[in-house]
Amino acid sequence: MTEHQVERPAPRRGRPPASSREEIETVAIDLFLRKGFEETTLAEITAAAGVSKTSFFRYFPSKGSIIWWRFDEFTSGFAGLLEEAVPAEGATLDLVRGCIIGALEKVIDAEGLWMQRFRVLDESTELRSGESEQWAAWTEHVASFVARRHGFATGDVAPQGIAGGIHGAYVAMLRRWLLVENPSSDLLPDLDRELQPLCRVLQSWLDEKPST
C-alpha cells in the first residue's frame, strides 16, 4: 500500500441496520410469526434488525408496543371518522359501516403487514388481555357515536348492544381473512356486504328504542 492509498473497511455482511420504526416493526413481526410472540426475545429483535437496545427504545417502549402502536393509530383514525360523521345525514348504522371501511382502508398496506399484525394478536395469549382492552376502546367509540346521534347515554343497552354486535361481526371477518393468501383492499367490499344486513337489523332495533 502506498502512502496515498487508504485502506477501505471490509463490506458489512448480513441485514443492514433498520433505520425507522416501520423497518424494526417489519423485522419483529416476521420473528413473531415464525417463533411466536412469547418466544421471541427483545435481544433477537434487535439483533435481526441490526440495532442497539437504545435505538429500539427510541421507537418502542416495549416488545408489545410493536403491535399496539398501529392498533392505536387505527382506532384513533376510526374515532376521527366517527366524529366527523356525527352531524351527517343518513342512517346511523350506514355511517358506522362506512367509517369502519374507511378506517380499515387507511391501514391496509401492499406488504400485508396489517393482517400479519392481526395474526400475531390472535395467536398470542400474552397479548390477548391487551387486545381485549384495545377492542373495548374501539367498541366504545361506536357506542358513543350511536348514543350521541339518538339521545342515549353511552352505557345504555342500545348503544352497547349495537357496538358489541358490530365488533363481533368485524372480528369474525378479520379471522376469515387470515386464510387469504394476499389480503388487500379488494377484501373491503366483502366486509361491506357482510355488515349491511346486520346494520339493517340493528338500525331497525335502534329506531324502535325510545331515548332515555
Image: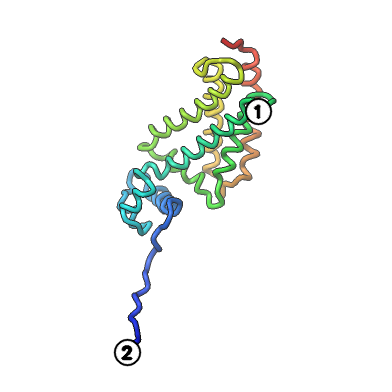
Q: As shown in the figure, which amino acid type bears the numbered disc 1?
A: Asp
Q: Position of residue 112 (x, y in %)?
A: 53, 49
Q: What residue do we see at 55% from left, 26% from top?
A: 142
Q: Position of residue 107 (x, y in %)?
A: 54, 43
Front-lying residue, 41 or 123: 41
Q: For residue 129, which quarter of the picture? A: top left
Q: For residue 103, which quarter of the picture? A: top right
From the viewer's perspective, is residue 158 above or below residue 124?
above
Q: Secondary structure at mark 2?
A: loop
Point out the image quarter for the C terminus. Answer: top right
Q: Which residue is mark 1?
A: 94
Residue 125: tell me if it is visible: yes
From the viewer's perspective, is residue 112 above or below residue 1?
above
- Spot the residue most to the bottom: 2
Mark 2 or mark 1: whose residue is earlier in sequence: 2
Q: Do callouts 2 and 1 mark residues in contact (Cβ within 8 Å)?
A: no
Q: Position of residue 158 (x, y in %)?
A: 56, 17
